[in-house]
Image (tube, helix red, strand yellow):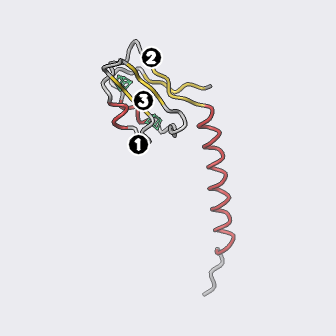
Amino acid sequence: MRYRGGRSSIGGMLTELVFSEVLNSIHKSNWRIGNDINQCKLCGKCEAVCSRNALNVNPISKTWTLNNRLCNQCLACIVSCPARSLTQIKL
Ligand code: SF4
Ligand code: SF4
């Protein structure tokens, strides 16, 4: 039996992958996680769930910092925040 999907399916998958990567990079560059520091409890839950190590929470210096270059906009930090102080902001 001949396999007919071969090259065009792989080509289609590659095109789809490149297209989604381009869309994703545009999306990432247009959005950023913002924190209302007045509501933030500096509990560190957002830092703990961030798989990209993009967040640093320091209760001693009372700082919350984001490395936006590492962030992939997965939004796990927003979901985990008990103070609801995180939002996704369009730049
Ligand atoms: S989870 Fe929310 S309250 Fe806790 S440190 Fe992060 S932003 Fe602040
Ligand atoms: S959106 Fe995802 S990658 Fe970005 S800071 Fe939050 S948990 Fe980390």
Which of the 4 image quadrants contains residue 36?
Answer: top left
Quadrant that contains the N terminus = bottom right
Mark 2 and mark 3 lie on one chain; the one further toward the N terminus is 2
Mark 2 and mark 1 in contact (Cβ < 8 Å)?
Answer: no
x then y, percent, for residue 47 = 37, 33
Q: Dot 1: what SS?
A: loop
Ligand 2 visible in quadrant: top left
x then y, percent, for residue 91 = 62, 25
Per the image, the residue denoted by label 1 is 51
Mark 3 and mark 1 lie on one chain; the one further toward the N terminus is 1
Q: Residue at x 50, y 37 (%)?
A: 71
Per the image, the residue denoted by label 3 is 78
The alpha-carbon separation of the residues under discs 1 and 2 comes to 22 Å
Q: Amino acid at mark 2?
A: Asp
Q: Residue furthest bottom?
A: 1
Q: Amino acid at mark 1?
A: Ser
Per the image, the residue denoted by label 2 is 36
Q: Is mark 1 within 8 Å of ligand 2?
A: yes
Q: Amino acid at mark 3?
A: Ile
Q: Dot 2: what SS?
A: loop
Q: Nearer the viewer, residue 59 or 30?
A: 59
Q: Is mark 2 within 8 Å of ligand 1?
A: no
Left or right: 4 with respect to 41? right
Q: Residues within 10 Å of mark 3 (few under 14, many from 20)?
A: many
x then y, percent, for residue 19 = 67, 51
Q: Residue furthest front?
A: 61
Mark 3 and mark 2 in contact (Cβ < 8 Å)?
Answer: no
Q: Residue at x 32, y 28 (%)?
A: 44
The alpha-carbon separation of the residues under discs 2 and 3 comes to 12 Å
Q: Is mark 3 within 8 Å of ligand 2?
A: yes
Mark 1 and mark 3 in contact (Cβ < 8 Å)?
Answer: no
Q: Residues within 10 Å of mark 2 (few under 14, many from 20)?
A: few
